[in-house]
């Protein structure tokens, strides 16, 4: 799996993001976006919605899994 820094304002439903939750960093599926409040709803891989998290806690995006690029994810990565 390849994860890159992300511009949270570009995150969309279906993206897999790296987010800080209660001091730990987890990969989550984005299930909804609230651009006005600068937050995303995150879900797990079992179909459960975990809740909302702010853009400042979204630190990365999964751009590839097993060498296969995730469509559109690289366009959301921050350029360093």
Image: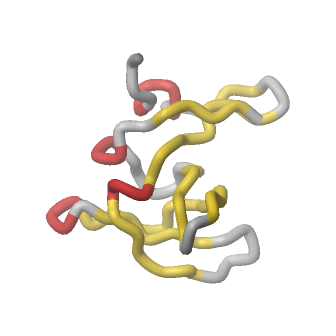
| Position of residue 76 measured from the top left corner of the image (x, y, whole percent) | 41, 32
Residue at far top of view:
80
Give the image's coloring scheme: secondary structure
Q: Which corner quadrant of the image does residue 66 belong to?
A: top right
Q: Residue at x 73, y 68 (%)?
A: 45
- Residue 46, given in percent of the width and then of the height, sits at 75, 76
Q: Residue at x 55, y 51 (%)?
A: 17
Residue at 55 percent of width and 74 percent of height:
22
In the drawing, does residue 71 fall left or right of residue 46?
left
Viewer-closest of 8 and 47:
8
Quarter where residue 38 is shown: bottom left
Please, is residue 67 above or below residue 63 in the view? above
**Residue 11 pos. (x, y %):** 39, 47
Residue 6, x across and y down, in percent: 44, 37
Report the residue at 58% width, 72% height from top: 43
Q: Residue furthest left?
A: 36
Question: Is 15 or 18 nearer to us in this picture?
Answer: 18
State left or right for residue 45 relative to residue 37.
Answer: right
Residue 39 vs residue 61: left or right? left
Q: Is residue 28 above or below residue 78?
A: below
The answer to whether 38 appears left or right of 69 in the picture is: left
In which quadrant will I find the N terminus?
top right
Among all residues in the image, which is located at the extreme right?
A: 66
- When the figure is inspected, residue 12 is found, relative to residue 49, above or below; the finding is above
For the image, the number of numbered tags is 0
Q: Quadrant of the C terminus?
A: top left
């Amino acid at each position: 799996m390849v994860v890159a820094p992300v511009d949270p304002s570009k995150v969309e439903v279906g993206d897999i993001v790296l987010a800080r939750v209660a001091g730990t960093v987890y990969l989550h599926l984005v299930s909804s976006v609230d651009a006005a409040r600068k937050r995303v709803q995150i879900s797990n891989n079992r179909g459960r919605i975990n809740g909302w998290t702010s853009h400042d806690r979204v630190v990365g995006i999964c751009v590839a899994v097993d060498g296969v690029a995730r469509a559109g994810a690289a366009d959301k990565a921050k350029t360093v």
